[in-house]
């Protein structure tokens, strides 16, 4: 994970008698998304760990610091609709066959992307992933 630091001006305080004034500075850590994805290379392709969030307004792939790769699906989690949408949209994104290995009834899923290399997966995800910071 790429970490950098930045200094933010948080406040400027003046003494009414103008004998003393000071700046309030804060050091904040900035993390670049893209490296916390769990990718596993196997003989058939790449296995990706994803967290699925159903009932979203649009299909979107996002990455958070705590959850890793998060996929927002439009469908409701009834009769495998979310799983079908996930397979369809990820197949469209990677231009490869996609299978769910585990997590058929869970929000945490392991997905196999057939016949693809790690760098191709990272390129496709970096082009579409929306980076979001964790809320505190």
Image: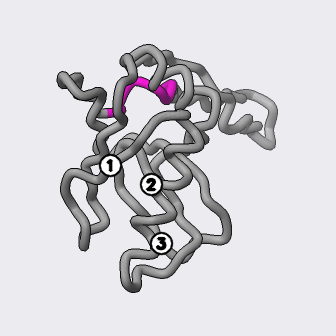
On screen, residue 115 versus residue 132, left or right, reads left
Mark 3 burial class by Cα count in 10 Å: few <14, some 14-19, many 20+:
some
- Locate residue 40, reporting x and y percent: 22, 27
Which quadrant of the structure image shows residue 78? bottom left
Q: Position of residue 136 (x, y in %)?
A: 43, 55
Q: Are marks 1 and 2 in contact (CB under 8 Å)?
A: yes
Alpha carbon of mark 3 to alpha carbon of mark 1: how far? 18 Å
122 or 115, which lies in front? Answer: 115
Could you say which disc has been placed on residue 85 in the image? none
- Nearest to N terminus: mark 1 or mark 2: 2
Residue underneath mark 1: 99
Residue 111 lies in magenta, yes or no? no
For marks 2 and 3 on the same chain, the one whose residue lies earlier in the sequence:
3
Q: Check the image and report above or below for 13 versus 134.
A: above
Rendered image quadrant of residue 55: bottom right
Residue under the image location 44 percent in, 70 percent down: 82
Q: Which residue is mark 2?
A: 87
| Residue 13 locus on image (x, y percent) | 72, 38
The stretch of residues the image draws in magenta is 31-37
Tag 3 secondary structure = loop
The residue beneath circle 3 is 54
Q: CA distance from mark 2 to mark 3?
A: 14 Å
Q: Nearer the viewer, residue 72 or 80?
A: 80
Near-viewer residue (121 or 11): 121
Quadrant position of the N terminus in the picture:
top left
> Does dot 1 land on a helix, a strand or a loop?
strand
**Depth order, front residue of 107/32:** 107
Secondary structure at numbered mark 2: helix
Left or right: residue 21 compared with residue 92: right
């Amino acid at each position: 994970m790429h970490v950098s630091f930045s200094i933010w001006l948080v406040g400027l305080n003046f003494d009414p008698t103008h004998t003393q004034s000071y700046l309030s500075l804060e050091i904040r850590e900035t993390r670049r998304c893209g490296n916390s994805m769990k990718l596993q290379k196997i003989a058939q392709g790449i296995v990706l760990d994803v967290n699925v969030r159903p009932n979203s307004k649009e299909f979107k792939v996002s990455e958070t610091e705590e959850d890793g790769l998060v996929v927002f699906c439009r469908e409701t989690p009834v009769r495998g609709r979310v799983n079908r949408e996930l397979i369809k949209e990820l197949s469209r994104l990677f231009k490869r066959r996609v299978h769910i290995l585990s997590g058929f009834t869970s929000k945490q899923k392991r997905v196999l992307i057939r016949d693809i290399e790690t760098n191709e997966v990272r390129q496709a995800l970096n082009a579409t992933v929306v980076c979001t910071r964790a809320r505190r």
